[in-house]
């Protein structure tokens, strides 16, 4: 599937941070992820790999997660 | 049984069976929501007696090209009904919902242009919408799936409780029916049925039923070949066919 699952690599383990990611853009020194259904998340991280065949993006944290001031997830 | 996917090989008659089921359910006093989850074929709305398609639900999240802008801080689309944990049919804005008697219809999205890209966003939206959709007490949801099995790869059936496989008299269709049964079982769909369609004789019905049942598949009924169904399809008219409708009535007796 073209929409990606984003993982953060941590000590050899991959932690899933978001599914159905439609957009990734630089945001300051980090990245902003937006899913097809409107979930939005800022991460202090850099891209390790983008695997388009397996719809997977792996990140590595570069700092603590910033406050999530931008969130469009209005579920419930 | 609240949410039923209608699957099968291309040309097996999925949309026709959806329209016949919807008409049959309506005549029994049920409220039906038909979800057009086929990104290609345009004709389901006409079979159901609507003159045009509803606006696609994909537009509620900004359309394929503008998902990112749609969820920016300033966008009004942030409050779209699709992001609710539970979506009721009545919550949907009127331009996205057609209604005729007891039948309502929504459309996920269609591929409209060359090179516009794949249908993955439609697949994800189908799954998310159907997962969050909370049918009313007397409401049944019929989902007209795209042909083939790609939707299983997208996990759409995980949001549904039943799968009805439409099988026409051909080797390919029988083979795909078996494959769909396996895939549906893998995602733990509760009920998986097969309905035979376009069957020209009782002997053919028996032969096909035997073949499928020997392999452990459940055949819930048989829809006879009905020239009126083909004629209405050829003319782009609402589906007709008293023989086929009668057969679908017997199938509904089994399903409900």
Image: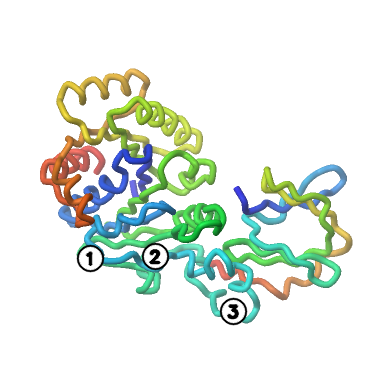
Q: Is residue B88 above or below residue B40?
A: below
What is the count of numbered marks? 3
Q: CA distance from mark 1 to mark 2?
A: 18 Å
* Residue placed under numbered mark 3 in the picture: B75
Label 1, label 3: how many angstroms apart (C-alpha)? Answer: 33 Å
Q: Secondary structure at mark 2?
A: loop
Percent position of residue B13, x then y: 29, 42
Q: Tell which circle, 1 or 2, labels the residue nearer the N-terminal end.
A: 2
Q: Earlier in the sequence, mark 1 or mark 3?
A: 3
**Letter of the chain that mark 2 sits on in the rendering:** B
Residue for badge 2:
B88
Answer left or right for B176 relative to B229: right
Residue A17, quarter of picture: bottom right
Look at the picture and state if B242 lies above or below A21: above
The nearer-to-camera label among 1 and 2 is 1
Residue at 73% x, 71% y is A68
Side of B152 relative to A44 (left or right): left
Q: Position of residue B178 (x, y in %)?
A: 40, 27
Residue at which label 1 appears: B100
A7 left or right of B29 in image: right
User: x, y (%) of residue B6?
Assistant: 35, 44
Q: Is residue B137 above or below residue B250?
A: below
Residue under the image location 24 percent in, 52 percent down: B22
Secondary structure under tag 1 reads strand
The C terminus of chain B - image quarter: top left
The foreground one among B7 and B11 is: B11
Q: Mark 3 packing: few (<14 Cα in 10 Å), some, or many (20+)? A: few
What residue is at 18 percent from the left and 46 percent from the top? Answer: B229
| Tag 1 and tag 2, C-beta contact below 8 Å | no
Looking at the image, residue B180 lies above or below residue B122: above
């Amino acid at each position: 599937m073209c929409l990606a699952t984003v993982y953060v690599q941590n000590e050899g383990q991959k932690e899933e941070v978001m599914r159905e990611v439609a957009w990734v853009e630089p945001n300051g020194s980090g990245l902003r992820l937006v899913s097809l259904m409107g979930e939005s998340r800022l991460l202090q991280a850099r891209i390790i790999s983008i695997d388009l065949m397996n719809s997977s993006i792996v990140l590595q944290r570069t700092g603590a997660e910033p406050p999530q001031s931008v969130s469009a997830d209005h579920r419930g | 049984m609240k949410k039923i996917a209608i699957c099968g090989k291309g040309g097996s008659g999925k949309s026709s069976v959806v329209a016949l089921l919807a008409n049959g359910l309506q005549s029994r006093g049920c409220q039906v929501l038909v979800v057009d989850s086929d990104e290609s074929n345009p004709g389901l709305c006409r079979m159901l007696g609507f003159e045009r398609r509803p606006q696609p639900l994909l537009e509620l999240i900004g359309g394929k090209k503008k998902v990112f802008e749609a969820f920016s801080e300033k966008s009004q689309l942030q409050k779209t009904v699709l992001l609710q944990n539970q979506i009721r049919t009545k919550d949907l804005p009127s331009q996205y919902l057609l209604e005729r008697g007891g039948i309502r219809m929504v459309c996920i999205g269609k591929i409209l242009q060359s090179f516009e890209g794949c249908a993955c966003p439609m697949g994800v939206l189908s799954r998310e919408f159907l997962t969050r959709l909370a049918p009313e007490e007397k409401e049944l949801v019929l989902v007209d799936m795209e042909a083939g099995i790609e939707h299983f790869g997208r996990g759409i059936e995980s949001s549904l409780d039943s799968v009805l496989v439409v099988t026409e008299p051909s080797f390919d269709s029988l083979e795909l029916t078996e494959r769909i049964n396996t895939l549906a079982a893998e995602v733990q769909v509760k009920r998986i049925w097969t309905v035979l369609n376009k069957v020209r004789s009782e002997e053919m019905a028996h032969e096909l039923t035997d073949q499928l049942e020997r392999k452990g598949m459940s055949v819930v009924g048989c829809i006879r070949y009905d020239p009126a169904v083909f004629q209405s399809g050829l003319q782009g008219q609402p589906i007709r066919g008293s023989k086929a409708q009668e057969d679908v009535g017997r199938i509904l007796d089994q399903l409900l």
